[in-house]
Amino acid sequence: MATITNRILVYDNWYRFYRLELTMDDGVTVERHLLDNGSAVAVLPYDMDRRCVLLISQPRAAVIAVGHPPLLETIAGMLESTAPQDQVRQEALEEAGVRLGTLEHITTVWSMPAVSTERVHLYLAPYTASDRVSAGGGADGEHERIETHEIGFDRLGDMVAKGELLDAHTLVLAQTLLMRLNR
């Protein structure tokens, strides 16, 4: 098994960026790069009575940099010093103004295993119209400019089929929900 034989910190701010030396099984040493930004959470709230999901959109520097319009995304955030379930509830309230009760953990995925330590805990969560307790929009001082979107199940299915959901976490959770609805 390959081992890390040297780790040089290149950048340390919102995330840490390292230059690594990896020694492979055969003794060859190679350079690799590592983005250490911790773990995250993402949730797709769904309303069975109104047959819709709650998604968000917001300006994303990487998306803007390649000239792409904003993506529809699940509610998500970095996992801080709290349990994933608590963090996902906090993000839902901040970003979409929705209070979540029951959470169903679907899986934990690596976002970019070639370069990043980030693992994302993915959840589905039922909600109702009465659970929308505020406008959302993001945490004060974070300048997230978040917009919320309620998308009907039929439209969500069309978006999946046409390849219109371009955020991986959103696609995984939408497909999971749609598969369950079709059982």
Image (cartoon, grey):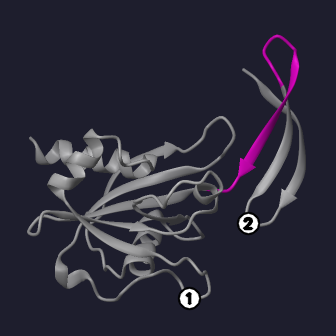
**Residue 140 got which mark?**
1
Q: Specify the amino acid type for callout 2.
A: Trp
Seen in the image, is 127 located left or right of residue 166?
A: left
Q: Magenta stretch containing residue 35, yes or no?
A: yes
Label 2 neighbour load within 10 Å: few <14, some 14-19, many 20+: few
Pick the front one: 39 or 63: 63
Pick the front one: 52 or 29: 52
Q: Magenta stretch containing residue 51, yes or no?
A: no
Secondary structure beneath dot 1 equals loop
- Residue drawn at (52%, 66%) of the image: 77
- Residue drawn at (50%, 52%) of the image: 120
Residue 101 position (above or below residue 65): below
Secondary structure beneath dot 2 equals loop
Measured as percent of width and height from the top left, residue 25 is found at 78, 15
Seen in the image, is 104 located left or right of residue 109?
A: left
Label 1 neighbour load within 10 Å: few <14, some 14-19, many 20+: few
Residue 164 position (above or below residue 102): above
Measured as percent of width and height from the top left, residue 74 is found at 39, 61
Residue 121 position (above or below residue 1): below
Q: Which residue is mark 2?
A: 14
Q: Which residues are magenta?
A: 23-38
Pick the front one: 31 or 58: 58
Measured as percent of width and height from the top left, residue 154 is found at 15, 53
